Image: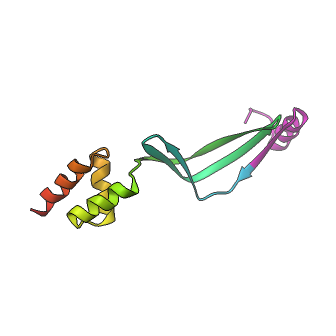
């Protein structure tokens, strides 16, 4: 916040300008991007409403994970007899390349 202004004064000023803020409680926030997910754990979320529009300010511990398709994971598990966790990890490390993930897991077995 601004230096020297207490939170209640700031709240009143925002209300006078037609702005409303509200804290949202959540255990995590997931943002899906093309090819990956941004996962924010222990988030602090503030929703700001103004003129019918909503904005969100989110802070917390950020981690980004590549997305894997369910069918790809099942195929790698089926072909290698690997656990879901190992199949997802291999696909992640191989940037979604199914053949490379299968070969990687088969090398580990040998």
Q: Is 19 or 104 nearer to us in this picture?
A: 104
Find the residue positioned furthest to the right.
16
Residue at 62% from the left image edge and 44% from the top image edge: 58
Q: Quadrant of the C terminus?
A: bottom left
Residue 105 position within the rendered picture, expressed as x and y whole percent measured from the top left: 19, 58
The residue that appears at 83% across and 34% down in the rendered structure is 51
- How far across and down, in percent of the image, does residue 5 sit? 80, 35
How many numbered marks are there? 0
20 within the magenta span = yes
Q: Is residue 55 above or below residue 103?
A: above
The residue lying at 84 percent from left, 36 percent from top is: 14
Task: Give the side of residue 75 with respect to residue 59, left or right.
Answer: left
Task: Using residue 30 as the reference point, say whether residue 2 is left or right of it.
Answer: right
**Colouring rule applied to residues:** rainbow
The N terminus, quarter of image: top right
The magenta region covers 1-22
Task: State yes or no: residue 7 in magenta.
Answer: yes
Q: Is residue 81 above or below residue 91?
A: below
């Amino acid at each position: 916040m601004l230096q020297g202004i207490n939170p209640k004064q700031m709240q009143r000023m925002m209300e006078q300008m037609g702005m409303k803020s509200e804290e949202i409680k959540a255990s995590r926030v997931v943002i899906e991007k093309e090819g990956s997910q941004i996962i924010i754990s222990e988030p602090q979320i503030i929703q700001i409403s103004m003129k019918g529009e909503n904005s969100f300010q989110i802070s917390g511990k950020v981690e980004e994970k590549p997305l894997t398709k369910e069918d790809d994971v099942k195929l790698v598990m089926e072909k290698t007899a690997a656990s879901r966790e190992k199949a997802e990890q291999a696909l992640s490390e191989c940037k979604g390349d199914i053949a490379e993930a299968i070969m990687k897991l088969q090398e580990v077995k040998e």
